[in-house]
Image (cartoon, helix red, strand yellow):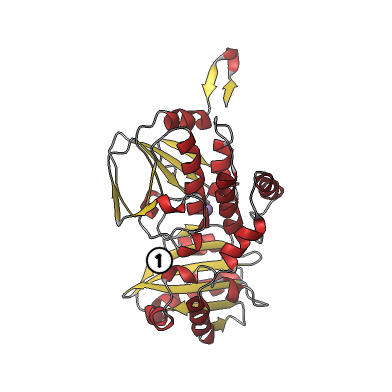
Amino acid sequence: MRVEGKGGIVINTIQDQIYQAAVSASRPLITSHINSDGDAIGSQLALYGALTQLGRPVTIINTSPLPEVYCFLPHAEVIQHSESINGDFDVVFILDCADLNRVGKLAIPNRATVINIDHHYQGELFGNLNWCREEACSTAELVYELIKEWDIELNAAIATNIYTGILTDTGSFHFDNTSSQSLKLAAQLVDLGVNPRYVAEQLYENMPASTLKLLAYGLEEMELSAEGQVASLVITRKLLEQSGAKAWETDNFINYPKSLKGVRVAILFQQIGDDYYKVSMRSKGEVNVAQLAQKFNGGGHYHAAGCRIRGSLAEVKQRVVDLAHNYSAGL
Ligand SMILES: [Mn+2]
């Protein structure tokens, strides 16, 4: 991890500096973004496994509850949920967050060393130490790159958590962050003890009946516009109530409008408050939805992005769908 600079001077790489901070941490915290996804959770738990082996008393706290679908992951039971995060932490790992606001309410001591590990397009370098690479398929990949150099055993538990981060963030190896590198990494993780069938079953074939019910309600009202190039799905709190589903159960819904022939942009509007909507966007081909999301102060990747918008459903839908028409038309 150390590289020789000119004249034999030893330069500490960012990975080395993070390792030094990790081994000397007396109260490390790991957190991630609101509405935890598989990459956030998998990365956190893999890093937890590594820090624990280094003898660090590590805490994981997220501002959103752990989605049930990830409860099968090794060590998932240690994840705490709190509306706001505070405590006397000296090293704070923030994973998979393009900016600090994504964590939610966070109050940590000023002297704490903030370590930002992330792969988002145009993510902010808000940490004291930033291990950020847009080319990485997932934050889990970056965590793996980091901890494989540590003096720890890469066991099946760590490997399963990393694998889940990669699998979910590449859309089960569908998205364009699926590369020779991510597939090789997956193979290495299988060699370390990951059972791909088991993980896939837990993630994709373990759905509560309420999810399918909610999806049916949503699909019934799905709208196609721009001659079938833009498809949008709306999930209101009322539909959640009617189906008995929880908010996280909509996680893969956007894949349904996206899977339609001819659709270039798929949009999921999910109500998160009165006149407040979470908007997820996916695209196929040459449509950059990260740019579209940025118009609404959101962000993400070329083919997968999102934002939050205040306004009535009709207003929010019209603003996003109108702009999506322009993007799908290549304007
Ligand atoms: Mn990610």
Q: Along the horizontal axis of the image, is 273 left or right of 146? A: left
* One can see residue 205 in this view: yes
Q: Residues within 10 Å of mark 1 (few under 14, many from 20)?
A: some
**Front residue (pair 261, 115):** 115
In the figure, 71 relative to 183: above or below?
Answer: below
Q: Quadrant of the N terminus?
A: top right
In the figure, 250 relative to 76: above or below?
Answer: below
Looking at the picture, how far across and down is residue 182, in whole percent?
Answer: 66, 49
Label 1: element kind: strand
**Front residue (pair 99, 87):** 87
In the figure, 294 relative to 109: above or below?
Answer: below
In the figure, 239 relative to 186: above or below?
Answer: below
* One can see residue 32 in this view: no
Q: How many marks?
A: 1
Looking at the picture, how far across and down is residue 271, in whole percent?
Answer: 39, 74
Q: Give me the residue at 56% from left, 72% from top.
A: 266
Looking at the picture, how far across and down is residue 246, in whole percent?
Answer: 42, 72
State the residue lying farthest toward the top: 7
Q: Amino acid at mark 1?
A: Arg
Q: Along the horizontal axis of the image, is 107 left or right of 38? A: left
Q: Give me the residue at 57% from left, 48% from top.
A: 162
Q: Quadrant of the C terminus?
A: bottom right
Q: Give me the residue at 50% from left, 59% from top.
A: 70
Q: Residue under circle 1?
A: 308
**Front residue (pair 253, 43):** 43
Looking at the picture, how far across and down is residue 68, in whole percent?
Answer: 46, 64
